[in-house]
Image (tube, rainbow, N blue to C red):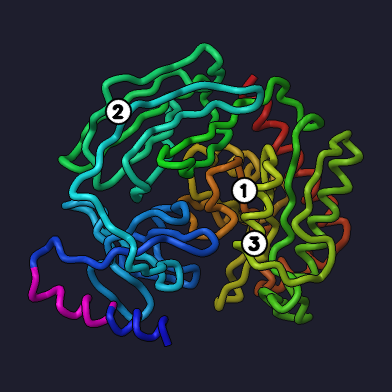
Amino acid sequence: MKRFFLFICLVMSICSLKAQTNTSYVAGLATGKLPALVYGLGEDRLGGAKMGYIDSNVVLRVIDSTKDLYKVQLSKSHTAYIEKPYVRFDTIVQLKPFYLTNSFMAKGDSLFDYVSIHVDGKLPYKSWMEIDPARIMVDIYGVQSNTNWITQLRSLKEVKNVYYNQVEDDVVRVTIELQHKQHWGYNIAYKGNALTVRIKRQPAVLDIRKLKIAIDAGHGGTNTGASGVRTGAEEKTYTLLFAKAFEKYLKLRGAHKIIMTRRTDTTFDNKDRVLFLQQQNPDLLISFHLNSSNNEEVKGVSTYYKHIGFRPLTTAILRNMLTLGLDEFGNVGNFNFALNGPTDFPNSLVEIAFLSNASDEKRILNAKFRDDVAKKVYLGITQWLLSMK
């Protein structure tokens, strides 16, 4: 009954916004597994285009409501949307009239570099990667700068420079320059009221045998995926066979730090896979899937990434996969697949071939082809590593 009463109050408050000033809102907190901000009301089968994940308990100013989404005011000039289950309303949430950034601290420990940005409260943010030069960019919304010092310690190994700009009256942009060209990943979350970016360093030895490699067999359990056009073969069955073939080949080549998201035909939600992988902290992730199209003539191999800093891995794998005589379906960026979403580690979704195409399906069902794919993905990773030496 209490939840119903709060919901009715929320609806009444939002409905009255049109008659009020632009500063009207209902305060809420981000909650749930991997809450994400999206840019707008557009969507595809994987959901709307995402700005990125945010931390739980980030304060949100809800200004409007659609069927499935709340619209939130990030700053004077910026809005975003968030799925309704990921917002918790609480009458004790009291927003301040203004928020300030305070001191920055940049330092390293034995494993990571850290950049901590002290803020008066847990405000919404967006982060992204840039290349040439390699940089991590962070926008913090609804805040004014009162940062008069940025402390950078010699324990930093990967971070080259840290600085910021007040790019709008209430948006602070933080730039973190990196030492190496290749992005190896970062995690961003609040520690207390400090928005902290934990940055992975380039491995000291660029040898696949020394890396921790995560392998994801797409779908599984109740999520069967696509079906073969001639045989009805289920995607979940063959992604697991490709994953195990890759694991076997890695071990033959001396790589033994291997993480599998699943080894059996089990249901494993994609968000739970992301959380599991973030805990495991691999050096890279390969996710195997099989494609499908309504057009039976469409065929070929493709690789996918979301963050531009991870593109080199995907292009190296695609280049090697094409030597198997597969058609090129392409290298696809900014892809909205859940396992491409994390910024924590380089990752590549490999859509090996099309189950909806008869000739591709025939190859997928061939055990030798699965072994050949394992070798080509391995070669792609080793060539990617070699390019950094």
Residue visible at 56% across and 76% down in the picture: 295
Secondary structure under tag 3 reads helix
Residue visible at 78% across and 60% down in the picture: 262
Q: Which residue is disc 1 drawn over? A: 348
Q: Which residue is disc 2 drawn over? A: 164
Q: Select label 2 or label 1 by which is in front.
A: 2
Secondary structure under tag 1 reads strand
Examine the rendered structure and indicate whether residue 334 appears above or below residue 85. above
Examine the rendered structure and indicate whether residue 18 appears above or below residue 114. below
Depth check, front residue: 248 or 166: 166
From which residue to which does the magenta span run? 10-20
Depth check, front residue: 5 or 38: 5
Left or right of 157, for residue 353? right
Q: Which residue is disc 3 drawn over? A: 272
The disc, 3 or 1, on the residue closer to the chain's N-terminal end is 3
Residue 255 visible within the image: yes
